[in-house]
Amino acid sequence: LQEAEDLARKRKLFSLMKNGVRLMDLNSISIDEQVKVSPGVVIHPQVSLQGKTVIGEGVVLGQGSIVKNSHLKEKVNILPYCVLEEVTIEQEASIGPFARLRPGTFIGEKGRIGNFVEVKKSHLAKEVKVSHLSYVGDATIGERTNIGCGFVTCNYDGVKKHQTIIGKDCFIGSDSQMIAPIEIGDNSYVASGSTVNRSVGEESFVIARARQETKVGLAKKFKKRKDGL
């Protein structure tokens, strides 16, 4: 059985190579029979393409990536060690490295999903950027919106999942949380470190954090000296 599976796998890979697909390591790449791969695609070592996946022309699949039942349009760049399942990615988008896109995710044209970002059941429009260390779940994000580092959609209240809607051309500062259900209007700005629990209209500035207080000289009361005194 192992020999038969290996033969079938290599037949698939050689067929793709004849049609203009570049495979960087035949011994470690796995592509299911139903997968469709267009000419000009580059597939690096240890990539696994599963189910009814469709890969458009000019796509680059980085090392160790897993793609299942997904559609990647032309010139998408998947950086190493990403996991994609039941997602659609439009032209010239960039994903990863180390990103996870879960079922129901749509990434618009020229979108960017960076390292250690997880997206689930969300629609991200054209040129949306979620660059690093964030979770986007049950959300709709408008065109050209930038999401800062450490962003979290608080979509689950323990019983139900709720929607987060962020308009176009918004800037969401680092370490911000959206407590769903919530809506942020177009052209709005959310200050870093904000926990937002009320919807706002267009062109709003949102800041939701405690005011900083500085007590000069008080640090010595809380900080132990190296000599233990």
Image: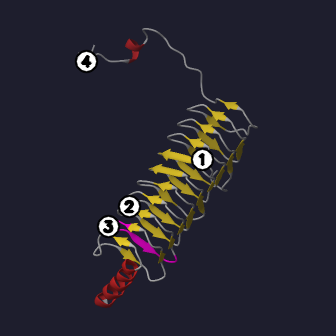
N-terminal label among 3 and 2: 3
Q: Which residue is mark 3?
A: 45
Q: Quadrant of the C terminus?
A: top left
Query: Is 4 left or right of 66, judged from the image as shown?
Result: left
Report the front residue among 41 and 130: 41
Q: Which residues are magenta?
A: 43-52
Q: Secondary structure at mark 3?
A: loop
Give the residue displayed 52% in from the left and 64% down from the top: 74
**Mark 1, other Cα within 10 Å: few <14 / some 14–19 / many ≥20:** many
Label total for image: 4
Q: Which mark is residue 62?
A: 2
**Mark 3, other Cα within 10 Å: few <14 / some 14–19 / many ≥20:** some
The three-letter code of the residue at mark 2 reads Gly
The three-letter code of the residue at mark 4 reads Lys
**Is residue 77 in the magenta section?**
no
Q: Which residue is mark 4?
A: 226
N-terminal label among 1 and 4: 1
Give the residue displayed 42% in from the left and 68% down from the top: 41
Q: CA distance from mark 2 to mark 4?
A: 48 Å
Q: Tell which tag, 3 or 1, sits nearer the viewer.
A: 3
Q: CA distance from mark 3 to mark 2?
A: 8 Å
The three-letter code of the residue at mark 3 reads Pro
Q: Secondary structure at mark 4?
A: loop
Give the residue displayed 39% in from the left and 71% down from the top: 48
Report the front residue among 198 and 133: 133
Q: Tell which tag, 2 or 4, sits nearer the viewer.
A: 2
Report the front residue among 210 and 172: 172
Q: Tell which tag, 3 or 4, sits nearer the viewer.
A: 3
Query: Is 52 left or right of 23, judged from the image as shown?
Result: right
N-terminal label among 3 and 4: 3
Q: Which mark is residue 153?
A: 1
